[in-house]
């Protein structure tokens, strides 16, 4: 009331007194402990709007307990929990607890998620999925295009010092495809962090085989094949790329295509597949993600089976060549991602 400083609050009080009036002091609530008082403060500030007040900052922990849409609150407390076996892609989890606030725009959330972090360069350079995590829940999923030294790009969401940029990195990317977002966004990941862990970064390795390949097996079981179906299915094996097997994913692809070939699942409608998206053989192999998403499961497996007919097959050595140049892998990854969404 008698503050002689030049703060916004002091100036506002002076304006009221200059009109011959005195500020009215009211108690909004009493008998509260400290934590309860902070929640009431945050609620009052959110209700009135920070721009209408002289406070320099929002209420204590307002980003956690403050104003929020009902749908967002429901998502925060009504989500399934992810385990490492649920991840079909290598991912980096980024806690944004200190930077996030309710009502952030999509762009602001992207900006605070992408940088700037102390990360293991050797690990993140092979990771193309980042998950923004707040209060133990995945808010958004981003496809990473590349990792760069911190400060390489323009940061529009917040100002940073050169000291803050030292020995840190940032990523550039975009919001992930719907299939990826459906798998992770809105899910809980608290169990993936060690209790009391202060590190905002958590790396998760993909677990392709046990879930995705089991689903592949189930789907292929339902496909009407020519040839000896029983033998075809009994020869299906599961490879775990996480068990010291650097060729685990390649072996999975090898087995899938070999069995499709021996099971007689080479397409008779391959030209129809061409016509459906207007692509010739070479262009079809380089089809975009959007074009792949328009193909049916049957068409995708048909393409994979066709790639390795007699004139393509070379005693198994083809797997190294085709995986290396990304042709067959392109389609297998689409299948694994699609069936992993089930």
Image (tube, helix red, strand yellow):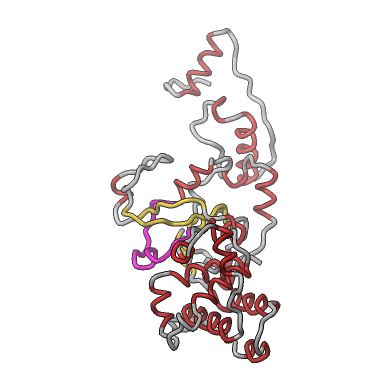
Give the vertical position of 277 relative to 67 (above or below).
below
> Residue 150: percent from the left, percent from the top?
33, 51
Lateral position of residue 144 relative to residue 260, left or right: left
**Residue 129 falls within the magenta-colored stretch:** yes
Looking at the image, which is closer to me, 5 or 104?
104
**Residue at 35% over, 42% down:** 154
Quarter of the image for residue 79 reads: bottom right
Lateral position of residue 168 relative to residue 300, left or right: left
**Residue at 42% over, 21% down:** 6
Q: Which residues are magenta?
A: 114-130
Give the vertical position of 197 relative to 16 (above or below).
below
> Residue 199: percent from the left, percent from the top?
45, 61
Looking at the image, which is closer to me, 278 or 330?
278
> Residue 336: percent from the left, percent from the top?
56, 70
Looking at the rendered structure, the number of numbered marks drawn on it comes to 0
> Residue 303: percent from the left, percent from the top?
54, 71
**Residue at 34% over, 67% down:** 122
Lateral position of residue 35 relative to residue 2, left or right: right
**Residue 87 falls within the magenta-colored stretch:** no
Give the vertical position of 197 relative to 38 (above or below).
below
Looking at the image, which is closer to me, 302 or 166?
302
| Quadrant into which the C terminus falls | bottom right
Quarter of the image for residue 117 reads: bottom left
């Amino acid at each position: 009331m008698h503050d002689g400083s030049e703060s916004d609050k002091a100036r506002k009080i002076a304006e009221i007194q200059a009109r011959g009036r005195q500020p009215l002091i009211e108690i909004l609530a009493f008998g509260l402990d400290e934590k309860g008082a902070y929640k009431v403060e945050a609620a009052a500030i959110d209700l009135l709007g920070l721009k209408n007040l002289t406070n320099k900052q929002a209420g204590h922990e307002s980003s956690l307990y403050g104003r929020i849409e009902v749908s967002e609150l429901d998502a925060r407390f009504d989500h399934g929990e992810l385990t490492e076996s649920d991840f079909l892609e290598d991912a980096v989890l980024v806690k944004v607890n200190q930077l996030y606030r309710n009502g952030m725009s999509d762009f602001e959330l992207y900006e605070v998620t992408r940088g700037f972090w102390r990360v293991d360069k050797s690990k993140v350079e092979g990771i193309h999925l980042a998950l923004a995590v707040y209060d133990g829940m995945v808010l958004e999923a981003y496809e990473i295009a590349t990792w760069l030294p911190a400060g390489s790009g323009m940061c529009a969401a917040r100002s940073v010092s050169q000291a803050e940029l030292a020995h840190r990195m940032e990523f550039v990317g975009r919001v992930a495809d719907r299939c990826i977002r459906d798998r992770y966004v809105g899910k809980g990941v608290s169990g993936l962090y060690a209790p009391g862990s202060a590190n905002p970064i958590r790396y998760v390795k993909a677990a392709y085989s046990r879930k995705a390949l089991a689903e592949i097996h189930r789907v292929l079981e339902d496909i009407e094949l020519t040839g000896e179906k029983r033998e075809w299915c009994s020869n299906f094996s599961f490879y775990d790329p996480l068990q010291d097997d650097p060729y685990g994913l390649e072996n999975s692809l090898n087995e899938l295509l070999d069995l499709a070939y021996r099971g007689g699942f080479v397409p008779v409608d391959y030209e129809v597949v061409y016509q459906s998206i207007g692509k010739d053989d070479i262009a079809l192999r380089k089809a975009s993600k959007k074009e792949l998403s328009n193909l049916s499961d049957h068409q995708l497996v048909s393409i994979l089976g066709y790639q390795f007919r007699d004139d393509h097959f070379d005693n198994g050595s083809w797997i190294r060549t085709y995986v290396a140049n990304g042709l067959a892998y392109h389609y297998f990854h689409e299948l694994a991602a699609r069936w992993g969404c089930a």
